[in-house]
Image: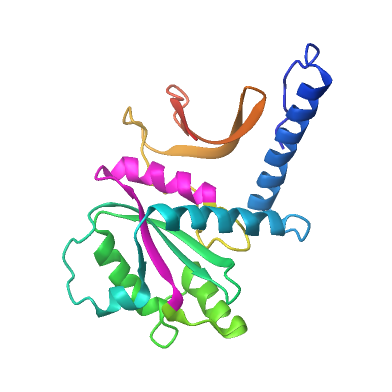
């Protein structure tokens, strides 16, 4: 864990209490995102539920059946970042997966075969977690939902947007992404690979989770943040 370095000597008691609560929320959020811990898993569940609820209220959601029955395979949604998710019988989000594509609709079509446990042949984490949920919780694969969450035609920018949402949905219990940042994500100065991490900013004594990206090139070290 990073250490919060802030001179609070001039803060009054209420301000110190606010800062403590804010940083505690960040620590709990970070723990919930990085560790499968019964003490923090309910925070992860609540966070995932709220994220998906917000997305459902602002974006067009497609069902498995809707995509399967549409015979058209042309570019219906364009390029961008998408979310695949599944809820249990109580309405809790039990699986999330963030992906990107230059043709989202066609990419979703290719997902369908392996989401269906009867036709699935791949061992990708997404499909393995789905099979386990279908088997253990008796969930229907046709209840898997799809939604485009970012419209982005630039391939490199899509990878950064994808990573940002992977960090948003990051959970060792619920999320099915293997990596935080795709290895194809390149420095904007053309140096090659980038690194990423979850960090924070302090704004008006509020601790805000931030996804930070930096170039791996020692001479460049270009850095930017998304929050």
Q: Which residues are magenta?
A: 143-168
Q: How is the image coloured?
A: rainbow
Residue plotted at (36% across, 75% down): 64
Residue plotted at (46% across, 25% down): 221
Residue 151 drawn in magenta: yes
Q: Is 203 on the left or on the right of 143, as rendered?
A: right
Residue 145 drawn in magenta: yes
Determine which quarter of the picture holds residue 145.
bottom left
Q: Nearer the viewer, residue 196 or 66?
A: 66
Q: Is residue 39 above or below residue 128?
A: above
Q: Nearer the viewer, residue 220 or 38?
A: 38
| Image quarter in which the N terminus is found | top right
Q: Nearer the viewer, residue 172 or 216?
A: 172
x and y percentages locating residue 137 in the rendered image: 60, 81
x and y percentages locating residue 6 in the rendered image: 72, 19
x and y percentages locating residue 130 in the rendered image: 51, 75
Determine which quarter of the picture holds residue 75.
bottom left
Q: Is residue 181 visible?
A: no
Q: Is 10 on the left or on the right of 84, as rendered?
A: right
Residue plotted at (77% across, 31% down): 20
């Amino acid at each position: 864990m990073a250490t919060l370095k802030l001179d609070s000597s001039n803060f009054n008691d209420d301000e110190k209490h606010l800062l403590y609560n804010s940083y505690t929320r960040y620590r709990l959020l970070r723990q919930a995102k990085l560790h499968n811990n019964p003490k923090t898993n309910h925070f992860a569940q609540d966070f995932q539920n709220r994220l998906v609820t917000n997305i459902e209220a602002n974006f067009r959601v497609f069902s498995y059946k809707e995509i399967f029955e549409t015979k058209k395979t042309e570019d219906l949604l364009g390029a961008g970042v998408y979310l695949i998710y599944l809820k249990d019988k109580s309405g809790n989000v039990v699986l999330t997966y963030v992906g990107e594509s230059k043709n989202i609709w066609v990419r979703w079509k290719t997902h369908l075969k392996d989401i269906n446990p009867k036709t699935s042949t791949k061992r990708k984490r997404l499909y393995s977690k789905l099979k386990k949920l279908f088997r253990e919780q008796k969930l229907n694969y046709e209840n898997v939902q799809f939604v485009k969450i970012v419209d982005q035609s630039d391939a490199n920018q899509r990878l950064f947007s994808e990573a940002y949402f992977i960090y948003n949905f990051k959970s060792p219990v619920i999320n099915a992404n293997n990596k935080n940042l795709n290895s194809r994500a390149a420095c904007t100065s053309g140096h090659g690979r980038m690194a990423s991490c979850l960090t924070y900013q302090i704004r008006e004594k509020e601790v805000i989770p931030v996804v930070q990206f930096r170039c791996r090139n020692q001479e460049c070290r270009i850095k930017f943040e998304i929050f």
